[in-house]
Structures are given as C-alpha cells and as structure tokens.
Image (cartoon, grey):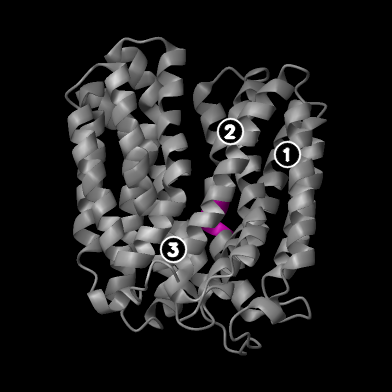
Amino acid sequence: MNRINYRKTFLLGFGFFAISVTWSVYNAFMPKILSSYISSAALIGFIMTIDNYFAVFVQPTVGMMSDRIDTRFGKRMPFIMVGMPLATLFIILLANHKSFITLIIFIVLMNLSMSIFRSPVISLMPDITHKENRSKANSIINFMGGVGAVIAYFVGSILWNKGMKYPFYLCAALMLISFIVLFNFIKEKRDVIGYESSKEEKVGLISGIKASGNVKNVLFLLIAICSYFIAFSGIEAFFTLYGENYLKVQTSAASISFTFISISFLIFAIPAGIIGTKIGKKKTISIGILGLVCCFLVIAFIKNINLIRGIFVVCGFFWALININSYPFVTDMAPKGQTGTYTGLYYLFSSIANIVSPPLLGAVIDIFGYKYMFIYGVLFFAAAFVLINSIALAQEQNIKVDIKS
C-alpha cells in the first residue's frame, strides 16, 4: 500500500499558503485603497476580478506548458521560479505606488505573476502523490492555505492600523519564504512519481479532454464544479447585503457571519480528505452537495442571524467535503503527463463561475428580491449533484483504502 509523504506534502503546502496569504491580503485591503481613487463600486468590483480573467486565459495555457517542458529543474519549478519572485516584487511595488496609474499597472502585473505559478505549484500535489492519497494530500495543502488566510486577516488587520504598506510587506515576506522552502525542498526529478521527460507532441485543452478516454465524464465533472462554485461564490459575494437588506442586521454583523463557514472549513479540511480517501471522492462530494442543499433550504426560511451562523458551521463541513475532493477528482481523470493541463481546466471552470455568478445572482435579486438568494444556491447545487452522479463510477479511479494508510 502506498503511503502519503506527510513531510513532503506539508512543505509543498507552502505554495498554496503563499497564494492564500496573497489573495486574503489583496481582497481585504485593496478595495479600500482603490476607493481612495475611484467612487464606483462596480469599477472597483471589476478591478478586483482581474485574477479570474487571468485564471481563464493564462492558467490553462501555463498548465499545458508545464506538462510539455522539461528542464534540469523539472516541469513545474521553472514557472514557480519566475512567478513567485515576480509576485513578491510587484506586491512590494504595489504597496509603494505613487499614482492611480501605477497602482493599476502593479495590480495587473501582480495578478499576471500569480497566474504564472499557480497551476504549476498546485499540479505538484498530484505529481508527488499516489491517486489513493490525493484527497488526504489536498486536505493538508488546503489546511496550509487556511492558516495563511488566518495570518493574513488577523496580522494584516493589525499591521493595517500601522500603515497601508505593512500588510503587503507581510505578504511579500511570506511569499519569498514560501518560494525558498519550495525551491530547496521540492526536487521534481527526485520527488515526482515516475518522472518522465516530456513528449514532443503538443496537447491542447480539447485534445486533452479527449485523451481522458471518456469526454462525457470529464465534462460532467468540470460543469459540476462550475455549477457548485456558481452556487457558493454568488452567495458569498452578496451575503453582507443579504444581511443588511433582508435580515435587517448591521453591516459588521452580516460580514463577520460568513467567516463561520471559513473557520469550519479550516477545521474540517483534513477530516474531509480522510473521508474522501475512505469512501471515495464521488460519494464524498455528493454527500457534501446534499448537505449544503439541506442547509441552504433551511436558511432560506429563517431570519435569525445567530441561527444562520450555527448552520454556517455545518455548511463549512459540507463545503470541505466538496472542495477538498474536487481537484483530486479532476487529476484522477487526467491521462499520464497531463496533470498541468487538467489543473488549468479545474481553474478555468471554477474561475468562470466566479466571473458569472455575482452578476447573475445580482440580476436574480433585482427581479425577485433577496428572499430567494439561497434558493438560487440550492438550484445550482442540485444541478451539480445530478452532474456528479452522471459520472460512471469506474471513472472515479479512487481506491478505497484503509484510513490508516
């Protein structure tokens, strides 16, 4: 029985740790910085979604490129060696911008730098992990990301009070430390299971899906992922307004409520990986979807914020069951040598959801009101459940192993 290398997985987790710290600092404080230059909330919102556009157009391409190349540092590490130092530099420059124009330039360059290394660094997890252990490994990596977010929010908030630049300096320092850890401790040609030099033929996104042997199953999974991210990200974006306008609570009370899901997700990340390893990814994701359908149906009919927070704790557990096992499920379907391509596909479909959902839910709210916001989530989660369970069981490629392995 193949065993997971916990030390190596933990060290690899510094990649997602750096990503999580960066986006947490960026999302928490950049709108405030932008608001000092522009008054349009819509324009601020558009600028804040630039990363999703890069995820759609850049990350799939970078993922494919990281499958094709072969250097003395490996396939993924060259992109990490370029992207992480550049991101560190542009984070520092962003903190020291002198005008709105330079701020926008550094925002774009930082987002581009992040897109260069995200798919490759995430692809290293399935590269160094046997299929039956990928849910466990992904849970550890997501736990590291959760720790990064907690550090960013709590320490970043303290540093913000001392000056606008300091949260970004923290972010840059942790990015650089994470790069040093990855570069020194992750050696692809030593650590990647069955490392092989790249073949000469080029594989595109469409041909990559066809190479899986079952186009229908891959598309069902990717569209399901898009569907449940549409359900979740839209509600996440609008919950503060939902609290103000429908629950009639203060802005601070509404905004802090969604953190109950985040904290619960962090607590249950590793157990979710263990469950996915034990009973299979498809079944685990299905349980998570059904759980969130039930939770959202209940929330749709109550207006007590404290009761909703309690249900959010349960939602965090079910969301962990889904999120921790989704990416490993995608990589299990990837043909040999195409992990980077499938990582790019995963981010492509999840990013499309993040782009589409806020305006789509906004239109629903404009027409029907906030009362039906959680019903919107239920419908897209239900669609995801149907799609996930349309995947042939044999395609899950997940071995049920003893939990002690």
Residue 300 falls in image quadrant: top left
Which disc is residue 135 wearing?
3
Judge the density around disc 3: few (<14), some (14-19), many (≥20) Cα neighbours within 10 Å.
many
**Viewed as shown, does residue 32 lie left or right of 404?**
right
Q: Amino acid at mark 3?
A: Ser
Using the rendered view, name the quadrant where residue 183 is placed. bottom right
Nearer-the-camera pick, 141 or 79: 141
The residue depicted at 50 percent of the width and 76 percent of the height is 130
Q: Which residue has dot 1 on it?
A: 171
Tag in front: 1 or 3: 3
Residue 98 vs 355, above or below: the answer is above
Q: Which residue is mark 2?
A: 27
> Regarding mark 3 in the picture, which secondary structure is present there?
helix
Give the Cα separation between the discs numbered 2 and 1. 12 Å
Q: State how far apart marks 1 and 3 are (Cα).
A: 28 Å
Q: Position of residue 400 (x, y in %)?
A: 33, 73
Provide the secondary structure element on which disc 2 rests: helix
Query: Which of the two marks, 2 or 3, is nearer to us in this view?
Result: 3
Segment colored magenta: 53-58
Front one among 135 and 18: 135
